[in-house]
Image (cartoon, rainbow, N blue to C red):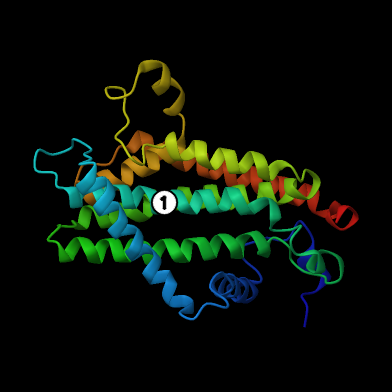
Amino acid sequence: MPPDRASATPSSIPFSRHLDLLWQFTVRAVEQRHRGSYLGIIWSVLNPLLMLGLYVTVFGVIFGGSFHTDVKETPLDYAMAVFLGLILFHVLSETLAAAPTFIVGQPNFVKKVVFPLHILPLSNVGAYWFHFFISLGLLILGGLLIGHTFTLYGLMWLPLILIPHMLLTIGLAWGLSALGVFFRDIMQLTNFLAIVSLYASAVFFRANAETVPPAIWAVIKWNPFLHTVAQARDTLLWNKPIDLLALGYTWAFGLIAITVGWFLFRKMQPAFADVI
């Protein structure tokens, strides 16, 4: 039975209602990613393992990369740091690339069914985070197998580092999915922004005021994702103290992003059916 009309209005509260529906659509989004393949959901484990092996070989062994954090840093240490940055990046890039299609790609839910449309962006982002946590688990397991030590300090801080990144992706999903209904060309821009975010977020290198030219650092230091990557590496992999100022900045940005994204979605939703 479809939800009642009141629950589908833009003013409905997104996290307190329709949780069962959100769960069903998240599971559906995860399954659709591998539908038709022989191994199905197993690819959620195989893909991160293949990626990790590739990064160890290419960046750690062939190019001999280093973040220059420790004189004892090994190719495996470098590859793990790159891998952590990339799985965080993939959540962001997938959201940027696909968010403009979350609503326009489901016209039946917009036109023919009284449906809480905010569920569609949430469920897709939920699927991206599902794959992230699988990759994160494999990273931790792989680190333990090679003798890396994960401290309780790093593991305790990690959720507080990841939550603002989650808020950011949800806000982007809501805002861009709403804008994508009215501006179909926005996908071309978000695809470009995804590439920019990769190189502006220190995924492959260590970025700070000492390692980056001042003119560039003056711009990229405002990128919240850069600080998320740096804080995750510092606490989880390198056992360094958390930068509370940088963490506070990512939380502020994440809260602003989810608030603005929900505001845009709520204001534009009444016109979705007319446009689509």
The location of residue 36, given as percent across then percent down, is 57, 78
- SS at mark 1 in the image: helix
Pointer 1 residue: 88
Q: Nearer the viewer, residue 16 or 47?
A: 47
Residue at figure coordinates x 78%, y 78% from the top left? 2
Whether residue 71 is visible here, answered yes or no, is yes
Is 227 positioned to the left or the right of 236 in the image?
Answer: right
Is 173 displayed left or right of 221 in the figure? right
Left or right relative to 8: residue 238: left
Residue depicted at 53% across the width and 42% down the height = 194
Placement of the C terminus among the 4 image quadrants: bottom right
Q: Residue furthest top?
A: 215
In which quarter of the view is residue 49 placed?
A: bottom left
Q: Position of residue 107 (x, y in %)?
A: 80, 64
Q: Is residue 268 left or right of residue 168?
A: right
The x and y percentages for residue 244 are 33, 38
Q: Quadrant of residue 207?
A: top left
